[in-house]
Amino acid sequence: MENDVIPLTVAEYFAGIGLVRMGLEACGWRIIFANDISEKKYEMYKAFFPDTEKHYKVQDIFDLSIADIPTTTLATCSFPCIDLSLAGNMNGIDGKHSSAFWGFLKALKLQDIGAPPIILVENVPGWLYSNKCADFRLTMRAQPDMN
């Protein structure tokens, strides 16, 4: 086992323009999949990263198929925060935008035992306080159903 090298590969969900990628690549990680629903964000991402067309899928996260998602070591999730943000509308985790978090869990479920062992979920401070902390507790307890 001492010679085994863990590949530092990433599936970047809600990739936006690639800010998470910028930080991870500086630490040796390699993004092999990225997803976002916004064509405009895709165009900006592509301006930063010439290899974008090989791995970036412009599609609603709920519509991803297992064939689209490679096996990685890390999955990042920077899901839309407007429903959780203190500056947003505070509609909660099941709001129109922030409910995309459940699409992320669906993507992990599709991968079954091939899901990444490391998950990084990024969002805003309001997430902790949304619906008197109930939204944060619900999402932290949520697990992809691997059955």
Image (tube, rainbow, N blue to C red):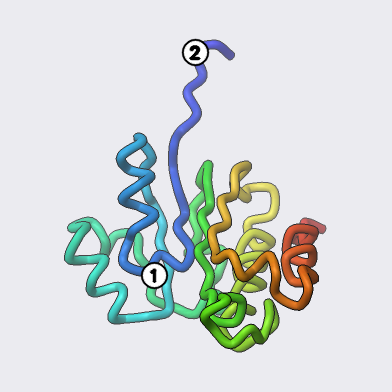
Residue 136 pos. (x, y %)? 73, 65
The answer to whether 40 is drawn above or below residue 109 in the figure is below
Q: Residue at x 35, y 35 (%)?
A: 28
Residue 2: image quadrant is: top right
**Among numbered discs 1 and 2, the one appearing first in the sequence:** 2
Circle on res. 3: 2
Residue 101 pos. (x, y %)? 62, 71
The answer to whether 109 is drawn above or below residue 116 in the figure is below
The answer to whether 19 is drawn above or below residue 39 in the figure is above
Residue 125: image quadrant is: bottom right
Residue 17 pos. (x, y %)? 31, 67
Q: Which residue is identified by label 1?
A: 57
Residue type marked 1: Lys
Residue 89: image quadrant is: bottom right
Mark 1 and mark 2: Cα distance apart in space? 34 Å
Which corner quadrant holds the N terminus? top right
Residue type marked 2: Asn
Q: Nearer the viewer, residue 57 or 81?
A: 81
Q: Nearer the viewer, residue 58 or 16?
A: 16
Which corner quadrant holds the C terminus? bottom right
Residue 123 pos. (x, y %)? 55, 64
Q: Residues within 10 Å of mark 1 (few under 14, many from 20)?
A: many
Q: Residue at x 80, y 59 (%)?
A: 141
Q: Residue at x 70, y 82 (%)?
A: 94
